[in-house]
Amino acid sequence: MLEVTLCGTKLRNPLVLASGIRGNSAGLLIRAGKEGAGAATSKSCSLLAREGHANPTMIDTQGVYMNAIGLSNPGVDDEIYEIREAVAKAGIPIIASIYAKEARDFAAVAARISEAKPAMLEVDISCPNVHREGAMFSSYPKDAADVCLAVRDATSIPFSAKLSPDVPNIGEIARACVASGASCITAINTIGGMYIDAHARRAVLANSFGGISGPAIKPVALKSVHLIRKAIGPGVPIIGTGGISTGMDAIEMLMAGATCVGVGTAVATRKESAPFAAIAKEMEAFMKKEGIKKISDLKLQE
Ligand SMILES: Cc1cc2nc3c(=O)[nH]c(=O)nc-3n(C[C@H](O)[C@H](O)[C@H](O)COP(=O)(O)O)c2cc1C
């Protein structure tokens, strides 16, 4: 009932572990398979190892989650072993997320990580671009396209471009990515924010700013996915991500136009030992009650 196909790969259900939630290690991606995920995305890895930001890096308050981990990762030469092991043992498709500050480094990381043969790559272009003083690659259609063209030429593995909603026209950015070789779009990444501790008179996160995730961003994610679907048409898959915590959230995301559903923060906040299986069960219960037989029948009324 829940099977879907994502870029030519069959998934038992549309629930995809979102990047960063479980880190870079093979063991944690393998665990997502045991917890019922349809596919698992690794934390973004860069050409060289990165330490990430100082603590505190996470806030969980008033239903809002905000992080500034700073893309800590072991670098692609180590990550390749983790992805290889996950591909061999997870029993679900593995999506290797990559990140860089220049288009040519994206190409280098893509070429190297492809040696581990993940089912897909996810290209995190919602991170700062060194040539634009901190703006994201996904802020401008040309920058987003430049990265996609570089990755397209570096690998034969299908890749998804991961977008930020912090842009005036997300549909235009998605179109530029697809025209430049992306086989899929992942949306959304976290939304930039800030918390202040008035007693301490300072920002709560050591990095001052962080990315908001969890239920607070679901409406933004639904809107973004809907706009992207309108912009790119029906043929290109979308991994709709952002604030998905329950089966009903996942159904709504599919109705907005997503092909698969990324689950991030909820993996840490749901109480079950197998959060993906629990969400899948809730989806099935809704579909049975409504007489809906397959995922592709989940659509908004015209
Ligand atoms: C702790 C944490 C780390 C993350 N790290 C990454 C990352 O390395 N690369 C990436 O593309 N997205 C990263 N994200 C963003 C998530 O993949 C996802 O897009 C976002 O959290 C929204 O989904 P959610 O509301 O289900 O968490 C991270 C999110 C969190 C909470």
Image (cartoon, rainbow, N blue to C red):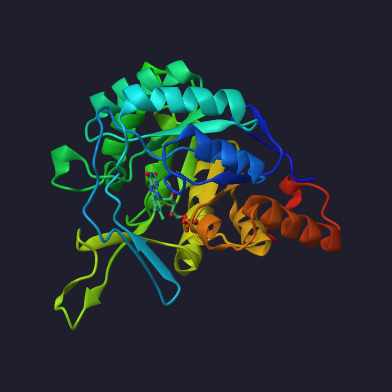
Is any part of residue 83 visible from this angle? yes
Could you tell me how many numbered marks the image carries?
0
> Where is 94 relative to 240, above or below?
above
Q: Is residue 107 left or right of residue 9?
A: left
Q: Is residue 299 left or right of residue 67?
A: right
Percent position of residue 78, x then y: 35, 25
Residue closer to the observer: 17 or 219:
17
Is any part of residue 237 visible from this angle? no
**Residue positioned 26% across, 61% down in the render:** 56
**Residue positioned 31% across, 31% down in the render:** 147
Q: Is residue 52 left or right of residue 187?
A: left
Residue closer to the observer: 17 or 73:
73
> Where is 231 relative to 92, above or below?
below
Q: Quadrant of the C terminus?
A: bottom right
Q: Which quarter of the picture shows residue 251?
A: bottom right
Q: Quadrant of the N terminus?
A: top right
Residue closer to the observer: 267 or 226:
267
Percent position of residue 286, x then y: 78, 62
Percent position of residue 217, x then y: 45, 65
**Residue positioned 31% across, 41% down in the render:** 141
Residue closer to the observer: 221 or 52:
52
Percent position of residue 53, x then y: 22, 51
